[in-house]
Amino acid sequence: EETGLTVQGVSSKRTPSCRIIGIIKRNWRQYCGILQESLPGAKFHLFLPHEKRIPKIRIESRQAEELKNSRVMVQIDHWPRSSRYPHGHFIKTLGKLGDKETENEVILAEHDILHHEFPEAVLDCLPKLPWIITEEDLANRIDLRDFCIVSIDPPGCTDIDDALHCRLLENGNFECGVHIADVTHFVRPNTALDLEARERGTTVYLTDRRIDMLPVLLSGNLCSLRGGEERFAFSVRWEITPDAKIVNTIFHKSIIKSKSAMTYEQAQTIKDDSGINDEIALSLRHLHSIAAQLRQKRLDKGALVLESSEVRFQLDTETHDPLSVMNKELRETNWLVEEFMLLANISVAEKIYELFPDCACLRKHPAPPISNFDPLVKAAETKGFQIKANTGKELADSLDQAVLLAHPYFNTMLRMLATRCMMQAVYFCSGFESDIKSFEHYGLATPIYTHFTSPIRR
């Protein structure tokens, strides 16, 4: 935002373009790092930034001895033509090198993540406790409190922003629903609360804590779809045939009362236990059956199943220090939830584009240039496999075939490598794109997509 560029137009038959002819101001920021050891009594010192792409910074300080083995923050002031390094000045000490809190602070500062306490002006926007639902609140909502709605999340999750239900209809079809926390009931446009959430943009999860986008009264309580609590939601409900064809879709505000806030493991146990046949178990089995078919249809269209190494930490309950690390175990209930969140996002994308064709906020994932796949192609060729990547379907099929029974992790490695070949998914306004084909989400193999889910954290 602080960088000003003088540009000059260059003719092009395709799209407007430009070239840089001068830099008005550099977008320097504050950097975290350590001081390089220097001679005793030296007045000038070299600062080694944590970010490896940033050059060393020359600073003046008489505190070098005290700052040894500490993480410090430095600001660049200018870069003389005659100097090998930019010149800057010391800002503050972050803490001892290697200390957990210090390193967390470095991560947050380097990624420009706001993590200060919420200001009074923001807290003043919050509802007063005890919070009471009024008749006025219910005026434009459909009452779903008697529905068997449940949430499925990781253990320890308190910011629950989605829940599901499934029930058998008299005509033999199913009604499935995704219910998303109605954050807009509490976060009104252009209030201090809204502006703060815009600045933060997302909830950030560290190993031992999270940095909320919204105050905890909302994120962990009034917006969170907790079990047994009456909460406001925005619901998407589908009538779906047993073979997963969508007959009808409706959207509305609602009030719900989740029957259970389950973990993925708990939901999997209930679904698999043939001795449990209550309303929740039957709902989970119906959801699983439909989700499996929805998933297969996406895969048949060329949706990609890529790999990423996700781990979780076991923490000490008192110090929150990591005790052990392990791979996250993915269950059927993980992709059950994933499929219905994808379906909700696709359905909402179609609806908002229908109603607001010039200003729908959508998300696209461009297809990568074929040259992006060169490292993947070469890696597969070492074991005699051919990777075709002219379309998402070709790539998906090629990855499915590249399996070595003697080396089960070879296919996993290829899928991780394929992830690195992808383009970045981006948000865009529908009115800025002239061709609806450019709306496509390559990785999900869907022609249109948005982010409707997860409003507490995004």
Image (cartoon, rainbow, N blue to C red):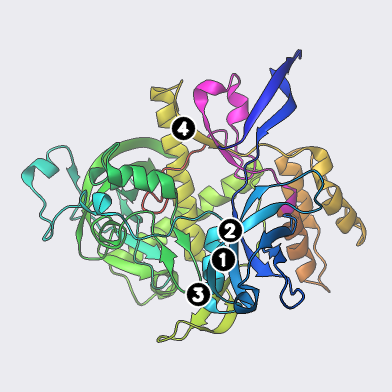
Residue 101 - label: 3
> In this figure, what is the number of numbered marks?
4
Evaluate if marks 1 and 3 touch, with contact meaning CB atoms under 8 Å apart: no
Kind of residue sitting beneath label 1: Val
Is residue 269 covered in magenta?
Answer: no
Kind of residue sitting beneath label 3: Glu
Between 179 and 69, the one lying in front of the other is 69
Between 127 and 429, the one lying in front of the other is 127
Q: Which residue is mark 2?
A: 110
**Mark 1 neighbour density, 10 Å: few (under 14) some (14–19) many (20 or more):** many
- Name which residue lies at 20% across and 62% down: 229
Name the element at disc 2: helix
**Is residue 281 visible in the rendered structure shown here?**
yes
Q: Which residue is mark 1?
A: 106
Foreground label between 4 and 1: 1
Q: Earlier in the sequence, mark 3 or mark 4?
A: 3
Magenta residues (range): 420-448
Between 234 and 242, the one lying in front of the other is 234
What is the spatial separation of the Cα atoms under label 2 and label 1, in whole angstroms?
6 Å
In percent of width and height, residue 251 lies at 31, 37
Where 103 sits versus 85, above or below? below
Q: Earlier in the sequence, mark 1 or mark 3?
A: 3
Name the element at disc 4: strand
Q: Earlier in the sequence, mark 3 or mark 2?
A: 3
In percent of width and height, residue 198 lies at 40, 44
Where 314 sits versus 34, above or below? below
**Mark 2 neighbour density, 10 Å: few (under 14) some (14–19) many (20 or more):** some
What is the spatial separation of the Cα atoms under label 4 and label 1, in whole angstroms?
33 Å
What is the spatial separation of the Cα atoms under label 3 and label 2, in whole angstroms?
14 Å
Evaluate if marks 4 and 2 touch, with contact meaning CB atoms under 8 Å apart: no
Residue 361 - label: 4
